[in-house]
Image (tube, rainbow, N blue to C red):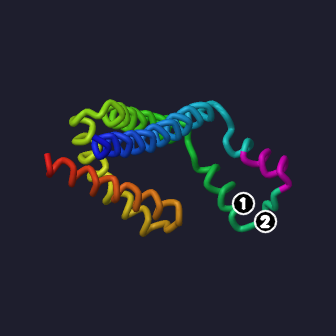
């Protein structure tokens, strides 16, 4: 009985992780769509001035340069992709939170299919945050695959 409750708790913790990812993606989508009709370059320059950042700093200059190349179409695409992924993560989270088998299967399929992209992105632009998310997703995938295999 206690072991079954522990499994349910772990599935719900994984569901919470999925919900957090969904919330962050929804915020990203809303943010992208918010800036569609805004001069992004001007907004970035205003932030640099407001927070007294050095525009000559390599990273600040790089960020300003990148904002100049972002088009409204690109922001629409980013928003749409963010909302699609958020919907998938919400669906996974709901399935796991309600302790449904389909939620476990869906999570294994989606998480497994996204791992190669996470690995590629980590190799292109390594960071501790990306490594942590990749490791957590791999642990979740391994745990759920083992659960599903046991039946």
Q: How many marks?
A: 2
Question: Residue 31 location in percent, x, y?
Answer: 59, 36
Of 46 and 10, the residue lying toward us = 10
Secondary structure state at the residue bearing disc 1: helix
Question: Residue 20 location in percent, x, y?
Answer: 49, 40
Q: Residues within 10 Å of mark 1 (few under 14, many from 20)?
A: some
Q: Is residue 32 above or below residue 125?
A: above
Residue 77 seen in render: no
Q: CA distance from mark 1 to mark 2?
A: 7 Å
Q: Quadrant of residue 142?
A: bottom left
Q: Are marks 1 and 2 in contact (CB under 8 Å)?
A: yes
Residue 52 seen in render: yes
Question: Residue 69 location in percent, x, y?
Answer: 58, 50
Of 135 and 67, the residue lying toward us = 135
Residue depicted at x 25% and y 47%? 108
Q: Quadrant of residue 96?
A: top left
Residue depicted at x 34% and y 45%? 6
Magenta extent: 44-52
Residue position marked by numbered label 2 in the rendering = 56
Q: Residues within 10 Å of mark 2 (few under 14, many from 20)?
A: few
Secondary structure state at the residue bearing disc 2: loop
Residue depicted at x 78% and y 65%? 56
Question: Residue 27 location in percent, x, y?
Answer: 56, 36
Chief secondary structure of the magenta portion: helix
Residue position marked by numbered label 1 in the rendering = 60
Of 79 and 128, the residue lying toward us = 128
Q: Is residue 122 above or below residue 68?
A: below
Task: Give the residue at the far front of this rendering.
Answer: 1
């Amino acid at each position: 009985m206690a072991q079954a409750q522990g499994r349910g708790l772990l599935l719900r913790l994984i569901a919470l992780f999925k919900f957090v990812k969904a919330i962050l993606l929804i915020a990203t989508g809303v943010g992208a769509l918010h800036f569609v009709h805004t001069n992004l370059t001007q907004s970035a320059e205003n932030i640099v001035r407001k927070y007294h950042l050095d525009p000559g700093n390599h990273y600040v200059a790089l960020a300003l340069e990148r904002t100049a190349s972002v088009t409204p179409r690109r922001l629409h695409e980013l928003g749409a992709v963010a909302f699609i992924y958020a919907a998938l993560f919400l669906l996974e989270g709901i399935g796991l939170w309600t302790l449904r088998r389909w939620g476990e299967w869906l999570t294994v399929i989606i998480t497994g299919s996204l791992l190669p992209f996470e690995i590629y992105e980590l190799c292109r632009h390594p960071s501790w945050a990306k490594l942590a998310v990749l490791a957590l997703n791999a642990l979740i995938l391994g745990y759920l695959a083992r659960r599903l295999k046991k039946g």
